[in-house]
Amino acid sequence: MTEQKEDDVCQPGELVTDNRFKRQWVKLKRNKAALAGGMLIIVYVLSAFFAPVIFPGNPSAPNLIKSLETPSVENLLGTDELGRSILGRIIYGSRISLLIAVGVVSVGMILGIPLGLVSGYYGGKIDFIIQRITDTMLAFPGFLLALALVAVLGVGLRNTVISIGISMVPLYIRLVRGCVLSVRAEDYVEAAKAVGTRDIAILIRHILPNVMVPITVQTSLSMGMAILFAAGLGFLGIGVQPPTPEWGAMLGSARSYLFNAPHVATFPGIAIFLAVLSFNLLGDGLRDALDPRFRI
Amino acid sequence: MNEQLKPLLEIKGLVTRFHTLDGVVKAVDGIDFEVYEGETLGLVGESGCGKSVTALSILQLLRCPPAEIMGRILFEGKNLLELDREGIRKIRGNDISMIFQEPMTSLNPVLKIGEQIAEAARTHKNMTRQEAWRWAVEMLRMVQIPGPNSRARQYPHSFSGGMRQRTMIGMSLSCNPRLILADEPTTALDVTIQAQIMSLLHRLKDEFNTAIVLITHDLGVIAEMASRVVVMYAGIVVEEAPVKEIFKDPRHPYTQGLLGSIPVIGRKRQTGRRLQEIPGIVPSPMETPSGCRFHPRCSKVMNRCCRQEPPMIRLNEHRRVSCWLEAHSTVKKSQAGGR
């Protein structure tokens, strides 16, 4: 009899778990900066998605008659040295930048998370080897590492993603390893071992979900960093190659006209700035929202 | 009583050491005991006597290095210490399982209760996800969790301490093991829940015919549950006896001290008589005293105790004790008998 009764009132348990996500959502929403960052990211994503709708036509087609025009009704942000609409190129450029951001964190996560898990969980020799490699990679500034990798791999979108992605790997390794070290010592990991769970199952089912929060935060911050690095490579002319509309490359080619047509460099610069800022704001907001120690 | 049964688990000369920066810590220093099929063996001693390390050594749940486990642990005649990683993993949960002291932290907060119980069944019994889930619900019913169907879908935070420990018991029983190592299963729970958990364990033990090694410092629990008792002190076994005899006639001064330190309700209070405590603390395993390890705290210490380690003296088939007092009295007895 009591069993039936209990069965009926057991629903609140489910509700509590909902509440956790709800509370995190509420915390994120109350953080105005994170909210603004999130909304800006949505704007970028939408513009990347609907670029052909917002800006019909080819953003890379030159129109030399209209070169270096200042902002007008026809060209809201003006035109560059080849007469191409800067707005159009920024909109199409968001596709490239977001693609790079997603690609880079994918490379970073795919390589970094397993290595971090193994390094933290097993310890010993494997840990030592992985950590010394990580140390070596961290000894270079991230951008320099990406630059060196581009020098080896060559230019282009794919190589940009790979080289920046690899320069992110040590960050993920360190982060995941650190979290695993603390989770590994938890009683429930030992309890799982005591019932004979395989190591791989312990890593994936017990440890990984418990380190997802810092990974999420790191991913948001890494995306901003990836966009900045890609723009940097583009600016130096060794990232994504022209005529592909890429923010960094746009900045690079506008450099020569900085004095007679400053708007050509300014607008792509603002696009980069806002994209990086919004990912960082969102990352900070996520950290506060997902950390159960910060209560509101 | 137990002689016709064959031992399920035999521990012979088990030594567990930890190599630390400060030196070698001998947490367990050469212990022997047996566990017979279907019995409950109580393993008692103060904190830091090596009880938990013994249990963890059996399942090799200690990180090696720094730990080093030596000796022989025979389970159904097979030495567990000779098995490789995969071999011992197949024993864990399937043949020997463990219940931990802290139910509040022994369940993973991000996994549903049902999933965690199902894990052992899926690992060892090759069940599909659905079969294992149904099995998990069945186990929850077995450990008397009301409404097991919906409870299995919940996360550990909506379970109380007692319910979590029931869940842990369900988990440890889910593959029908031959032996359960219960490491202070009720220490973290309040008294009424303790009694419930203990009676549950007792009932399930009979139902499944599982042997239990019950590690505790609660002698009341031992009196209720165990059939035999092994008393440990500073990493060694100092006395072993059937439970009734240990309460009636403790031989080792340490056992006597343990028994003397618990209040007995209803015992007439004698004027001016305090509850007896054992002075001092368990010595650090890095600096074990010379001779008998208990001599600095012993109320009956003799000269010999400081110099020579007492031998293990077998009093009869079920009893043994490691104390010079017994050595003297047996020697005297045999001398008296000889004359």
Image: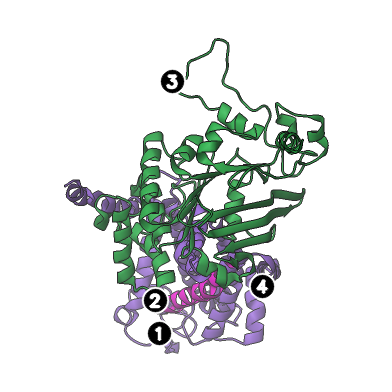
User: Do pointers 1 and 4 mark residues of a single chain?
Assistant: yes
For marks 1 and 4, give the CA distance: 31 Å
In the rendered image, the residue lying farthest to the front is B339
For marks 1 and 2, give the CA distance: 9 Å
Residue, disc 1: A59
Is disc 4 in contact with disc 3, using a CB cutoff of under 8 Å? no
Q: Residues within 10 Å of mark 2 (few under 14, many from 20)?
A: many
Residue, disc 2: A91
Instruction: For mark 1, give the secondary structure.
Output: loop
Q: Residues within 10 Å of mark 3 (few under 14, many from 20)?
A: few
- The quadrant where residue A149 appears: bottom right
- Chain in purple in the render: A
Q: Is residue A114 magenta?
A: yes
Residue, disc 3: B266
- Kind of residue indicated by mark 2: Ile
Q: Chain of mark 4?
A: A
Q: Chain of mark 2?
A: A
Q: Residues within 10 Å of mark 4 (few under 14, many from 20)?
A: few
User: What residue appears at the point 24 percent right and 52 percent down from the top-left corner?
Assistant: B147
